[in-house]
Amino acid sequence: MSEHAFSDQERAAVYRAIGERRDMRHFVQGEVAPQVMTRLLSAAHQAPSVGLMQPWRFIRITERALRGRIQALVEAERALTAQALGERSDEFMKLKVEGINDCAELWVAALMDNREPHIFGRRTLPEMDLASLACAIQNLWLAARAEGLGMGWVSLFDPKALAALLGMPSGAKPVAVLCLGPVAAFYPAPMLVMQNWAEERPLHQMLFENRWGEGA
């Protein structure tokens, strides 16, 4: 074992947070203490980013009316997604896809504007700015689980409409509506698995060796 490894107890805690993280949709009343929120955002801000560009921006939504407008955008896209799903539309509409009006904290995670000058690591893969933001969101998610808080990532919205609603500058792009707060319990498995929408695939199906499709 590497001399830099955590202790057995510390490693178990890290893997527990990863294994028990869930995309939460059900929240209960309560608050997120300011010092806890600071820890969560600090964890997000410590995420890796290509070229150290740190493209993430987080907007806290505190106006109840604004929450309602965001929820309306999500509901509009939910209906359009149902239409696009065809024969699974009715099944999809039965799913709970967000907890915007129930969670203690609502945040929007976005990509900053003026990302074009950041070429380091992005000349051939410009989408690495999005990958960097995703890492920040995952840090936030895992830290929230360690704090006993649930978090849900909502991606059902028109990004242009949400950007306009939040007064974002040209070039900035909202990527996630994040519902965060106390929960009664964490789902024992991903909610979409529990509701028979999808099944998780085993890791070995994602592993290749040397060439695409060649089993490891």
Image (tube, rainbow, N blue to C red):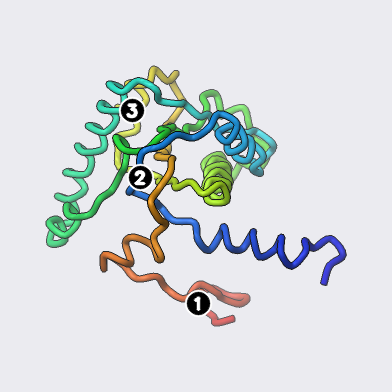
Q: Residue furthest bottom?
A: 215
Front-lying residue, 214 or 5: 5
26 sits left or right of 94 in the view: right
Residue at 40% x, 35% y is 104
**Please, what is the three-letter code of the amino acid marked with disc 3?**
Leu
Query: On screen, 36 above or below 84?
Result: above
Classify mark 1: helix, strand or loop.
strand
Front-lying residue, 123 or 91: 91
**What is the quadrant of residue 156 in the picture?**
top left
Q: Mark 1 against mark 2, which lies toward the viewer? A: 2
> Pointers 2 and 3 in contact (CB under 8 A)?
no
Residue at 39% x, 23% y is 62
Give the residue at mark 3.
Answer: 162
> Pointers 1 and 3 in contact (CB under 8 A)?
no
**Please, what is the three-letter code of the amino acid marked with disc 2?**
Phe
Q: Residue furthest right?
A: 3
Classify mark 3: helix, strand or loop.
helix
Q: Position of residue 143 (x, y in %)?
A: 58, 47
Give the residue at mark 1.
Answer: 213
The numbered dot on residue 27 is 2
Query: Who comes first in sequence, dot 2 or dot 3?
Result: 2
**What is the quadrant of residue 51 in the picture?**
top right
Tell me the distance, in whole angstroms, between the alpha carbons under discs 1 and 2.
41 Å
